[in-house]
Image: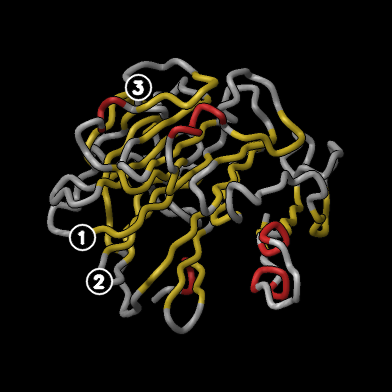
């Protein structure tokens, strides 16, 4: 799924152009669509990008600044800090107050009192971070991936009380686990919770079935982390010096990594993206798959 701003409309160079026209934005989607996650008005898969005709007017909420795709749901974050969700909602992951799916983008009204700065979508759960550093999660909690100290599911975003005295900067939702990056917290920057059977939590040298209370990810005590990523049973982090760190399920038949492991490379990375069975890393000179990094 991709958000695209049309330069002619956004820059406002045309005479008499209204503010609403300046904020006109187009969003395309493609792939699996049987749960309404493509918002095309049809419960069908699409092989080619489709323009979302039912995307709501964002003139008061700003343009889309971030899109997060989960197992079969989507989260859109606007420049004004508002959140819309659509797709599969049978676990409460849309945050609409009911466990129902939605074919069209709908606002997450519970978050209207907050300015949201970061979002993430897991297989069937969602995470939202506010500008004040508060963390909210909803959806499937059966593996503890919501971080509320239990294994309950929630159909509206609930604040994660464990971090009430900290400042959350990012959340990354994997299949059944979550990672949290704290701001200005030396030695205890990353926390993990949820399923840990493949080492994706990074909290122990032994395999952990699941935990419902956030625990510190080991191995970052002397490292300044700037971003985190999770997908499937994989986890990753980038440090300020451009180094890539990986843990969780092994790629290409390699063994699972139970604790954070530095990926040995002479390259400096600025972004990392994890897929179900692969990873991509971005440097100043190009994009590399995990197998290409050396």
User: Looking at the image, how many numbered discs can be counted on the residues?
Assistant: 3
Marks 1 and 2 in Cβ contact (< 8 Å): yes
Estimate the spatial distance between the alpha carbons at disc 2 and disc 3, rounded to whole Å.
Answer: 33 Å
Residue 102 % position (x, y)? 72, 30
Q: Nearer the viewer, residue 196 or 98?
A: 98
Marks 1 and 3 in Cβ contact (< 8 Å): no
Identify residue for label 2.
241
Left or right relative to 40: residue 273: left
Q: Nearer the viewer, residue 199 or 44?
A: 44
Q: Secondary structure at mark 1?
A: loop
Which quadrant would residue 215 be assigned to in this image?
top left
Placement of the N terminus among the 4 image quadrants: bottom right
Q: Which mark is residue 224?
A: 1
Q: Which mark is residue 166?
A: none
Picture layout, residue 201 above or below residue 49:
above
Identify residue for label 3.
148
Please tell me which residue is depicted at 74% across the width and 53% down the height of the picture: 29
Mark 3 Cα shell of 10 Å, populated few (<14), some (14-19), many (≥20): many
- Indicate the colouring scheme: secondary structure
């Amino acid at each position: 799924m991709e958000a695209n701003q049309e330069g002619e409309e956004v820059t406002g160079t045309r005479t008499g152009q209204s503010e609403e026209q300046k904020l006109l934005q187009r969003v395309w989607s493609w792939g699996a669509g049987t749960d309404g996650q493509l918002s095309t008005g049809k419960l069908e898969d699409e092989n080619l990008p489709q323009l979302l005709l039912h995307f709501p007017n964002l003139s008061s909420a700003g343009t889309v600044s971030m899109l997060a795709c989960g197992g079969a749901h989507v989260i859109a974050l606007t420049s004004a800090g508002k959140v819309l969700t659509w797709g599969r909602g049978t676990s409460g992951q849309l945050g609409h107050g009911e466990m129902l799916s939605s074919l069209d983008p709908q606002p997450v009204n519970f978050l209207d009192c907050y300015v949201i700065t970061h979002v993430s979508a897991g297989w069937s759960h969602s995470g939202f971070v506010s500008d004040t550093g508060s963390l909210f999660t909803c959806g499937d909690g059966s593996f503890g991936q919501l971080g509320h100290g239990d294994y309950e599911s929630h159909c509206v975003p609930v604040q994660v009380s464990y971090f009430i005295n900290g400042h959350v900067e990012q959340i990354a939702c994997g299949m059944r686990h979550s990672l949290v990056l704290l701001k200005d917290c030396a030695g205890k920057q990353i926390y993990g919770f949820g399923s840990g059977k493949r080492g994706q939590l990074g909290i122990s040298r032994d395999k952990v079935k699941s935990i419902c209370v956030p625990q510190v990810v080991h191995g970052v005590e002397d490292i300044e982390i700037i971003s985190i990523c999770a997908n499937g049973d994989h986890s990753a982090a980038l440090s300020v010096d451009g180094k890539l760190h990986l843990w969780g399920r092994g790629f290409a038949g390699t063994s699972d990594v139970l604790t954070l492991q530095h990926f040995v490379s002479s390259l400096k990375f600025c972004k990392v993206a994890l897929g179900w069975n692969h990873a991509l890393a971005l440097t100043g000179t190009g994009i590399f798959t995990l197998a290409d990094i050396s």
